[in-house]
Amino acid sequence: MKNRHFQSDNSVGSILKNCMNILSVARSFSSLSFEISMLAKNGSVHAARVNRNEGQSMVPLVDGLAEISRDIGIEIETLKSDCILLSRKISICSIAIKRYYLYTRCLAICIASTSQGTEGSRVSGYPLNSDADDSLNSEMTYDFVESLSKWFDSLSPDQLDNHQKRNMEHLALKSRFNRQQIETLAGDSIQIIENATKRLTMIERSRLTMSYIASSISINTPNLKSSADRFMDLVENTLDLVHQIEKEQDELVKQAQMGKVLLKKLLTRKGL
Amino acid sequence: MKSKILFESQKHQWLVLGRDSEKQKEVVDTNEYVILSDENVMLLDPGGSEIFSQVLAALCRHVDIEAIKVIVASHQDPDIVSSLAMWLDLCPGVKVFCSRLWTGFIHHFGMGTAMELIGIPDKGMEIPIGNSGNSIFAIPAHFCHSSGNFSFYDPIAEILFSGDIGAALLPTSDTDLFVEDFESHIQYMETFHLRWMPSSAALREWVQRVRNLRPVMICPQHGAIFQGDNAEKLLDWLESLEVGIHDDLSNPELDQRMAQLRNNRDFSV
């Protein structure tokens, strides 16, 4: 029983850790968005300084960079608020999981102690061994409350007091409520992760555009008589940012996928 | 988990739950006390969340869970009351009593559950056991060990729940629920009291207060229960005890290490 309990704590811990990782990557995007806007401003200043005709080709490119910084900023803000919502949902979910475990663990102890000497009796999805640990290893099902009442019927009257029966029914109902709450919250969390993944697609589009703009600036730079070095620096910094965004994006995708796997485990009861 | 009825009259019963053989060895063993008075249930120090399932399973055999009306906490420690959120979830509307000093702190155990937490004033109070018409009394036990600490006395059963006073850290979970031989039991109490009780004066004041009540049983939260002569012997022993920190706490190695780190600070950015 002890090991099983630790295992549940670990699975809740993994989900919470994963959620914190997602939130932390989402936050790191904010600083990148700020850096893009700074680059765009620098680019505008450089374009304004060069000869009007020479700088003409650079103006739409740096304007494009400014536009990306605005677009990406909006996506990142939404991503951040999604991730904050996700951490709230996961926190509430972890409390429900804790409760679910403690109540079902109590039920397992009650059932095991009542079942001693009634070899072979079972509640659907809930084997009744003298060892409560084995009971916990089974999967709880939605029909647990109904199954429990069938199990009550199979007992002789002297095996269970009325208040013990009422208490177990009360616990079964509470467990079912917690199970439903876990499922709702895990479902909501998966939806949030999927939304976040969509935001990442938008961010990826902006990243590719940035990369394209950097290449275009790089192509136009040799034609400039002045400020070529400054534009080459701009290109280099933009490509650095593109790489950083790509790295953060990959990490977020990895964490989001992991989060979905953990939450789906919860939904399929394999993780509980 | 063992359970035993400590007192029983027509409509009033005391029950102890303890000696949990299923708990992890790192978790300190605790006794949970239950009063059933005219179908109203009161829990005294319901315990930590790590042993919640075992306590609840043991309790399920004796009382209706939904009849739990009151929970009292002798002080704020996690082994006393960290399971509170679960009890409140199972029995909404339960009134919780603890020292006024700890109400804000105990709310941290709430996990978002609605809680009616009533602060016990320093001089103590009468606490009704639901609608039974019976009450227990909060007896000040401040600084024994917590700065906001109470024992609880039931004048019907003449039982005193003493919290951590008289507590013992027993070597195994198959020990008797009652103290059989007081002299040999001292070894399990002594270290606990010398370190956990900060004030000899406070302990003696408490002993004086309890002598006036003349309880037939003194029930601590850890260890074994004192009844009859052993209750009297416990009070004598506590009265003679010099508690608090007496050890030399100087640690030259640690001081040297801190000084070394302080001197090596790098102020460059």
Image (cartoon, coloured by chain):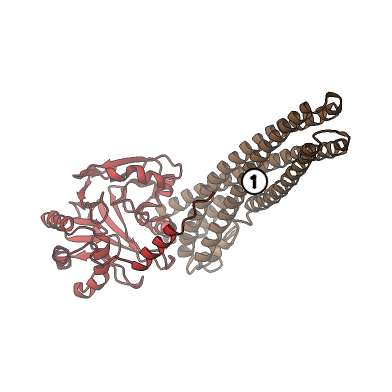
Chain colours: A brown, B red
> Badge 1 local density, few (<14 within 10 Å), some, or many (20+)?
some
Q: Please indicate whether residue B101 sits to the left or right of residue A175 in the image.
A: left
User: Can the viewer see residue A128 in this picture?
Assistant: no
Position of residue B268 relative to residue A110, above or below, is above
**Residue that appears at 46% across and 42% down:** B112
Q: Return the residue nearer the eye: B124 or B15.
A: B124
Q: Return the residue nearer the eye: A59 or B127.
A: A59
Residue A222, quarter of the rendered image:
top right
Q: Please indicate whether residue B190 sits to the left or right of residue A114 in the image.
A: left
Position of residue B256 relative to residue A178, above or below, is below
Q: In the structure shown, which secondary structural element does the residue marked by tag 1 occupy? A: helix
**Residue that appears at 64% across and 40% down:** A31
User: Can the viewer see residue A124 in this picture?
Assistant: yes
Residue B195, quarter of the rendered image:
bottom left
Residue A73, quarter of the rendered image:
top right
Q: Chain of mark 1?
A: A
Q: Position of residue B60 (x, y in %)?
A: 40, 55
Q: Return the residue nearer the eye: B75 or B231.
A: B75
Residue labelled with disc 1: A25
Which amino acid, by three-letter code, is at mark 1? Val
Position of residue B95 relative to residue B217, above or below, is above
Q: Position of residue A153 (x, y in %)?
A: 51, 56
Q: Position of residue B183 (x, y in %)?
A: 19, 74
Q: Position of residue B209 (x, y in %)?
A: 13, 53
Q: Residue furthest front?
A: A225
Q: Where, quadrant-wise, is the N terminus of chain B in this rendering? A: bottom left
Numbered marks: total: 1
